[in-house]
Amino acid sequence: MDTGKHQLVKDEDGLYTVEPLPEKKDKLVSVSLPSTKSEKQPITEEPVDQRTGQQVIEALSKAYGTDSTVIGDFLDSPHCPAFLEGMFFDGSTLVFQVRGDTTVARHTLEAAAKSGAFRLEPATDESFTQKQLKEIKDIIWSKREKLTDEYLKSNMAGCGISDHHIYQTFIMNTPEARKAFREKIIDSPAVIFEGPTEKAPNNSMGVSDTLGILLQSDYPVFSTQSKQATFVLVNHSKVTLRSGAYYFLTYEDERGVWRDLPIHGSFLDIGYIIEPGRTRHLSGSLYPEIHHNKPGRYRFFYPVTFTDTGRKATLMAEFKLTDNPQELAEGQKEKRLAVPSTQDNRSAGTITTSVPEVPTDDNHLFQVVECMPEFPGGMKGCMDFIQKEMRYPEEAKNAGIQGRVHLQFIIEKDGTPAQPRIVRSVHPLLDKEALRIIRQMPKWTPGKQDGRPQRVLYTIPIQFRLPKS
């Protein structure tokens, strides 16, 4: 093998494989072995030349390995010297971790590799070798499989080996999680804990219904104890969408701040194609055993790519969690009808724009313009229309449900109200009626900026009030 055209890559299980180097001739390529300069060293643009060390590893693989076609997988071989307990790269230098007499170790390895292009690191009681770390990692995963503590088991998102430590990643890296791990898995200085320590603010926004593409939850409400919420993506546009497995979730806290709802951060690298006229069913994990989710508003975000232009867009579906059995039963009577309220009216073959979140001269979305949109007859005309059009749901009347639903929608350049969505919910029955009212509205006078009609995001409340008995 010509090692000058290949690189050694270590996978998550600690095995090494040889992969081709990129074709670029003017740069040398570094490999993904650990570095001793820093346990958490930032990625740098400047690569290092590790080909000499790779040649040593190839030679030792032939000398000690059980399979001559596999490069780097010789540390666990019965032919490997017992003193050799690990290897990694420190920059361009190959380092072997050895236990015992380093003089004997160097002589033995140089003879087998026919090269002395490496450094030895003596194993001590104060540090951990790759062999020891692998044994600890095996203990961690063995005990995890037997756990009855669902909180800890679900929270353990991943476990990886560096040069001298094991990094245990939690979905939520809390003192309670670390204490439970030390008590029920292993208490070792070799383990370093990672993961978010708090739920960070996240004001991300997406679009729910645009160009004939709809993302919505199967039900408007789920239980606070639900392990997952389910969704459907409907593509009634003229363009094929491409997506993956990645998604993320946010929730609104008691102060009205939107925050991350951390989830397992590893996703299979799978590509999905959603052709026009097709749907895709999705789910988002809620981890109630970790987050102790409270009643309130939640959002599910799902990135897609428009294959005609390559532009990316983030779709969003809002839903609620409740601990009220009556509200849950009402909200899950039947799945919501998944039909986009928007249409893709662009000509086939000339589709060049994406969803509103990708600002262009054609689709830029304003929140404030010099001349705001106006309903026919002004705000009084709008309120009169809402009261005249409203059909108070009988079930909501009988249950005494009332309140103010807040909605957002886009007033297009021609004055058409489009893409209505709930931004503050009261109850699924009232939410549904509020959305219906917005969809029945006539055209508005569009908003204008610099004398030109513009697309404007508009927010409006709809009050549902029962007569006093």
Image (tube, rainbow, N blue to C red):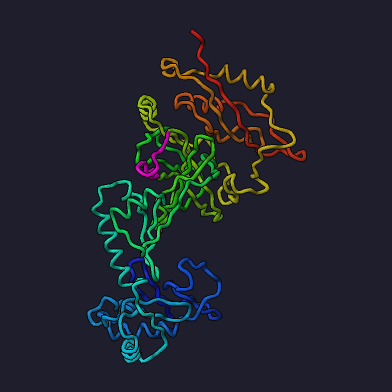
- Number of callouts in the render? 0
Q: Position of residue 351 (x, y in %)?
A: 58, 50
Q: Residue at x 45, y 50 (%)?
A: 197
Range of residues picked out in magenta: 282-294
Is any atom of residue 281 visible in this view? no
Taking the image as shown, residue 296 lies to the left or right of residue 58, namely right
Q: Dividing the picture into quarters, in which one does residue 39 lie?
A: bottom left
Q: Is residue 141 magenta?
A: no
Which quarter of the rendered picture does the N terminus lie within? bottom left
Q: Position of residue 317 (x, y in %)?
A: 48, 40
Q: Dividing the picture into quarters, in which one does residue 61 lie?
A: bottom left
**Which residue is nearer to you in this view: 344 or 115?**
115
Q: Dividing the picture into quarters, in which one does residue 219 lie?
A: top left
Q: Is residue 129 above or below residue 180?
A: below
Taking the image as shown, residue 196 lies to the left or right of residue 226, namely right
Q: Is residue 290 magenta?
A: yes
Taking the image as shown, residue 442 lies to the left or right of residue 109, namely right
Q: Residue furthest front?
A: 125
